[in-house]
Image (spheres, helix red, strand yellow):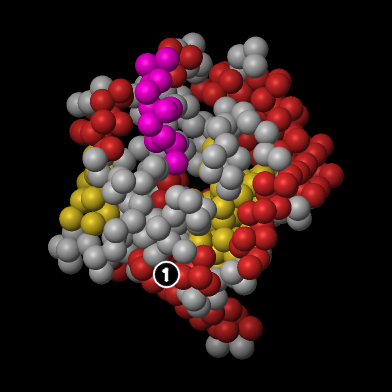
Amino acid sequence: MEMTMRWYGSQYDTVKLWQIRQVPGITGVITMLYDKQAGELWPQDQIHALKEEVAQAGMHIAGIESVNVSDAIKVGTKDRDEHIENYIKSLENLGKEDIHMVCYNFMPVFDWTRTELARKRPDGSTVLAYTQEAVDAINPSDMFASIKGEMNGTVMPGWEPERMAHVKELFEMYKDIDEDKLFDNLVYFLKAIMPVCNKYDIKMAIHPDDPAWSVFGLPRIITSKEKIHRMMKAVDDPHNGLTLCTGSLGTNLENDLPDIIRSLPGRIHFAHVRNLKFNSPTDFEESAHLSSDGTFDMYEIVKALYDIGFDGPIRPDHGRMIWGEVAMPGYGLYDRALGAAYINGLWEAIDKAETRGV
Ligand SMILES: [Mn+2]
């Protein structure tokens, strides 16, 4: 594995590349061209400039999160093929710049859903949290307004104001899309991009739906081991892989995370590792990474990744807001650095136990 951290670019991120560089063990960042809308072409010169900026800070781009898939592709509208053509060209440009891992998602309307961005925990830290009761009580177009005030002045991916201004139209677009149609559109998209992925060895890593169940009646197709395997079989190419996001798949307590990991050797190309603390099966908060602070056994998760020979980028994913930091919720420097150090520690202990035969 390679330890990485997500970076939102010098224009948008409160965290600087030089700070990320000082986190022990981090050699790469996960980033993207943040001014690009889903469906738009990524020019090679802009990718190159981003790559240079990261290289000057002593790191490299370990992968892209995300080249976003447009609603036209997800819904299968008449613009779909044009958007897929742009996606293929963007992948080609990334391949030419020696970038080989691309995360994306196939979630309708919302990239992810939380009902609170700053729930206070007993130690005074604040975290993102989710309560099903709050979702059930709110109209989707009011959802954005209710959390906007908690974004600390940042723009959170998937919740851009321009996009959220069209929430009603977005819901209208998806009104006839059920799980089977959405799945067929995903397969159509993957089949179209596999040739360019093979040519440039680009590993596609779909991000699981978050939370791992239907929200506001929208279909969800990447929520469980069974559904992930269905997708892997439908396009049975090693370049068709998964972002193992423990915090997303783990929202459903029936998902056995180490078991899911062990069932997918060679198909996990990227890992988001974080912990959740469940107060009830439908109320959870993003705790510290440490196993004892949440519900997941982080040792078993990292051990499963180690055992399947996972060699892709891994990142601590979200962190708590601690030590007075003001940053994009979930994406402060401090707690993610603690998460990276903790995961590195688990990995080193597992590796030495294995190789020294302890
Ligand atoms: Mn994730």
| Circle 1: residue type | Ala
Residue 114 % position (x, y) = 31, 40
Residue lying farthest to the right in this orientation:
199
Which quadrant of the view contains residue 51? bottom right
- Does the magenta-highlighted stretch encompass residue 354? no
Q: Quadrant of the C terminus?
A: bottom right
In this rendering, position of residue 59 left or right of residue 250: right
Q: Quadrant of the N terminus?
A: bottom right
Give whichever of 234, 145 is nearer the camera. Answer: 145
Helix, strand or loop under label 1? helix
> In this picture, is 214 found above or below 151?
above
Residue 179 % position (x, y) = 51, 22
What is the number of callouts on the image? 1
Q: Residue under circle 1?
A: 337
Q: Is residue 350 visible?
A: no
Q: Residue shown at 67%/39% (left/top)?
A: 42
In this rendering, position of residue 205 left or right of residue 341: right
Give whichever of 165, 167 is nearer the camera. Answer: 165
| Range drawn in magenta | 157-169
Q: Residue shown at 26%/22% (left/top)?
A: 139
In this rendering, position of residue 91 left or right of residue 136: right
Q: Is residue 260 visible?
A: yes
> In this picture, is 132 found above or below 120?
above
- Does the magenta-highlighted stretch encompass residue 167? yes
> In this picture, is 245 found above or below 111?
below
Q: Residue shown at 65%/12% (left/top)?
A: 78
Q: Residue shown at 26%/31% (left/top)?
A: 145
Q: Callout 1: 10 Å neighbours few (<14), some, many (20+)?
A: many
Residue 22 % position (x, y) = 49, 76
Residue 280 % position (x, y) = 22, 46
